[in-house]
Image (spheres, rainbow, N blue to C red):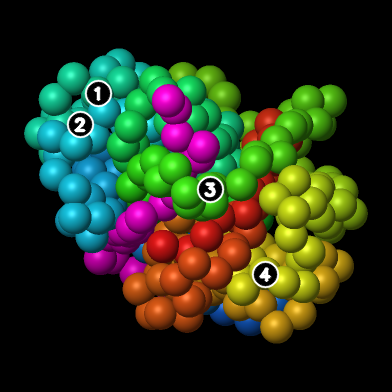
């Protein structure tokens, strides 16, 4: 008999050691610390030098696996969400599996840009519910510095490199699912407002269009994710949205009505890390014990595509 659902049992994250400050950027392009803080709320971001997407994904996944009490031999599904991997084949998931010694897993990458992690988590949950997998590693990893135009002051101030990961397992027969139904979709008619295209790609975006869409359309969609899980926004213990811009996160949380909840604002110290941003922020909150185990948390990703996805999970 297939399990009634799945749950996150552990998290892990990784960030490269090099810190790029706003003052550092002021020596590279015409900008300054106050301008960046006022417009996007970012103070620092981490930049990978020799680390690849696969290296960072492996480091985060290794920590999640160590925290889970499971062995590499217990994992039979590896999913990596990324939109910045320069190497296309073999995919990141098989590279992670090889580095961690995971034998013969189903392994694939998901590219839904900044909502990729939520897509990947939903896919792993569906696979476990269907009996197609038992224990999964779900990873978001990005090296956006590889696709950033460091001469464009409107975009280069935004992005950083990181990875976050979760171990997902089945719930018991009498246990409530720890990952709620996914609410996902896209606005393809606006898909050209964030792009990474061509053989030497750079991230390009229409920031004002993204901002208007995020602050007007997303609150209703986030409410729908809560409704699918049978929970009211004001009952959430935490809200972990994609860390795109502090000026998007704050009004989104306010319009959603997550009063009293912890609202992730890792954007301040990590910048926008696309598919890595939600698991990175969640892993840090758990590490700092800011969310009680078992408490409801809304994960909500949005970005290039324009894709969006969200689900309520129970904090491991």
Sequence-first disc among 1 and 2: 2
171 or 216, which is in the foreground? 171
Q: Nearer the viewer, residue 193 or 132?
A: 132
| Label 4 SS | loop
Distance CA(mark 1)–CA(mark 4)? 34 Å
Write down the residue under mark 4. Answer: 236
Q: Secondary structure at mark 1?
A: loop
Sequence-first disc among 1 and 3: 1
Q: Residue 212, percent across and down?
A: 86, 52
Mark 3 lies on residue = 177
Label 2 – label 3 distance at C-alpha: 26 Å
Gap in angstroms between the C-alphas marked 4 and 2: 34 Å
* Most distant residue in the left direction: 101
Q: Residue furthest top?
A: 89
**Apparent side of residue 97 relative to residue 249 in the rendered image (left or right):** left
Question: What segment carries the magenta color?
Answer: 1-22
Determine the CA span between mark 1 and mark 3.
Answer: 23 Å
* Residue denoted by label 1: 105
> Disc 1, disc 2: CB below 8 Å?
yes
Q: Position of residue 63 (x, y in %)?
A: 22, 56
Residue 23 at least partly seen: no
Distance between mark 4 and mark 3 Cα atoms: 16 Å
Q: Judge depth for marks 4 and 3 and give the one in front.
A: 3
Which of discs 2 and 3 lies nearer the camera? The answer is: 3
Helix, strand or loop status at disc 2 = helix
Identify the residue under disc 2: 97
Q: Nearer the viewer, residue 316 or 267?
A: 316
């Amino acid at each position: 008999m297939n399990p009634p659902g799945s749950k996150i049992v552990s998290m892990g994250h990784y960030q490269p050691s090099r810190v790029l400050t706003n003052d550092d950027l002021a020596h590279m392009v015409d900008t300054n610390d106050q301008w960046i803080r006022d417009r996007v709320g970012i103070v620092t971001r981490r930049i990978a030098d020799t680390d690849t997407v696969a290296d960072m994904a492996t480091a985060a996944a290794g920590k999640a696996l160590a925290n889970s009490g499971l062995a590499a031999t217990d994992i039979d599904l590896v999913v990596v969400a990324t939109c910045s991997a320069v190497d296309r084949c073999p995919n990141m998931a098989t590279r992670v599996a090889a580095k961690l010694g995971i034998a013969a897993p189903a392994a694939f990458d998901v590219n839904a840009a900044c909502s990729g992690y939520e897509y990947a988590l939903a896919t792993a949950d569906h696979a476990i519910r269907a009996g197609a997998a038992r224990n999964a590693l779900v990873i978001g990893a990005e090296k956006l510095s590889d696709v950033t135009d460091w001469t464009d002051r409107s975009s280069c101030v935004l992005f950083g490199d990181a990875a976050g990961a979760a171990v997902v397992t089945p719930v018991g027969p009498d246990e409530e699912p720890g990952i709620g139904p996914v609410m996902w979709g896209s606005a393809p008619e606006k898909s050209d407002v964030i792009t990474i295209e061509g053989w030497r790609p750079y991230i390009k975006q229409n920031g004002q269009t993204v901002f208007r869409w995020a602050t007007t359309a997303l609150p209703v969609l986030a409410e729908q994710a809560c409704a699918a899980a049978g929970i009211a926004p004001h009952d959430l213990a935490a809200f972990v949205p994609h860390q795109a811009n502090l000026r998007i996160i704050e009004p989104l949380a306010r319009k959603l009505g997550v009063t009293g909840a912890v609202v992730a604002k890792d954007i301040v110290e990590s910048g926008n890390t696309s598919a890595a941003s939600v698991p990175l922020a969640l892993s840090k909150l758990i590490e700092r014990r800011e969310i009680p185990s078992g408490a409801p948390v809304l994960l909500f990703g949005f970005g290039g595509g324009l894709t969006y996805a969200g689900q309520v999970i129970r904090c491991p």
